Amino acid sequence: MSTLRVDPVHSDSDRRLFLSFPWQVYRDDPYWVPPLFSERLAFVDPERNPFFQHASVGLFLARRGGEVVGTIAAFTNRLYNEFQGVNTGFFGFFEVLEDPQAAAALLERAESWAREAGHEAILGPAQWSTNDECALLVEGFQDSPRILMTYNPPRYRNYLEAAGYRKAMDMWAYALEIEDYQRRIPQKLVRVVEKVRRRGKFHVRRVSMKRFDREVEHVKRIYNSSWARNWGFVPMTDAEIEKLAEDLRPILDPELVVVVEYEGEPIGFGL
């Protein structure tokens, strides 16, 4: 077997190899949904992703005989550590061919990076936090991935457990047949909802694209306050929410974005 090396990503060409590698891992997998490559380039670009304003990141390529066989990222999310009161590093972008040695070497390289950064523990996979994509798929491999949920081969679990990793938290994704659900909604619940609406204090409306900037300001307040006590949460900065809104605006269907108001004040939204 040829020599294995794990090297930092330094050049633009290395970064493109890093981001395009999943196409090699999943080329025969009918359930994998490839990302937009241009979006991935922006996602790891410190000049275009506000995440890097409170983070330090190292990207690594595993090569065997000159061929890329795996990738991993190691990073510090300073805002996460401040908000959670911990001192942990993270790893993500963990992709590898059927090569246990390469998987072990990649994880060891991420751990070394986190140790050198002064962290006491390492958590992952995450790209970059619970506000983005995180977690490892351990069930449901014969099913299409949900939006913003990770997808990976079953062997990754074995690689991580062999390196000493253990589950920190369960994450679930659900599918629901809407028509079937509508038939099963309890009529008592329907009557209660209608009664609450008639009182006039609660109002459900669609997002206003004409006042989009103002709507984004409501989202900033509602999102961070409502998620504050959830496991693993890290607040999104104003710049991060504004960047997300900028990316979503061209493709948003206002009919699918619901805002709930109480006495005229927005208190919730659904996207």
Image (spheres, rainbow, N blue to C red):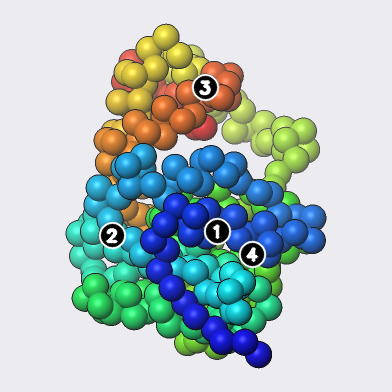
- Point out residue 141 in the picture as x, y percentages from the top left corner: 73, 64
Other residues around mark 1 within 10 Å, as few (<14) / some (14–19) / many (≥20): some
Q: Nearer the viewer, residue 189 or 175?
A: 175
Residue type highlighted by circle 4: Asn
Q: Nearer the viewer, residue 199 or 74?
A: 74
The mark nearer the N terminus, 4 or 2, is: 2
> Alpha carbon of mark 4 to alpha carbon of mark 3: how far?
29 Å
The mark nearer the N terminus, 1 or 3, is: 1
Q: Tell me, yes or no, if residue 194 can be seen here.
A: no
Quadrant of image for the N terminus: bottom right
The circle on residue 17 is 1
Secondary element under disc 2, as helix, strand or loop, is: strand
What's the residue at 35%, 55% (across, down)? 233
Residue type highlighted by circle 2: Ser
Other residues around mark 4 within 10 Å, as few (<14) / some (14–19) / many (≥20): many
The mark nearer the N terminus, 3 or 2, is: 2
Residue that badge 4 annotates: 152
Q: Nearer the viewer, residue 103 or 83?
A: 103
The circle on residue 250 is 3
Residue type highlighted by circle 3: Pro
Name the front one of labels 4 and 2.
2
Q: Nearer the viewer, residue 121 or 225?
A: 121
Query: In the image, is residue 139 above or below residue 242?
Result: below
Q: Is residue 207 left or right of residue 82?
A: right
Q: How many marks?
A: 4
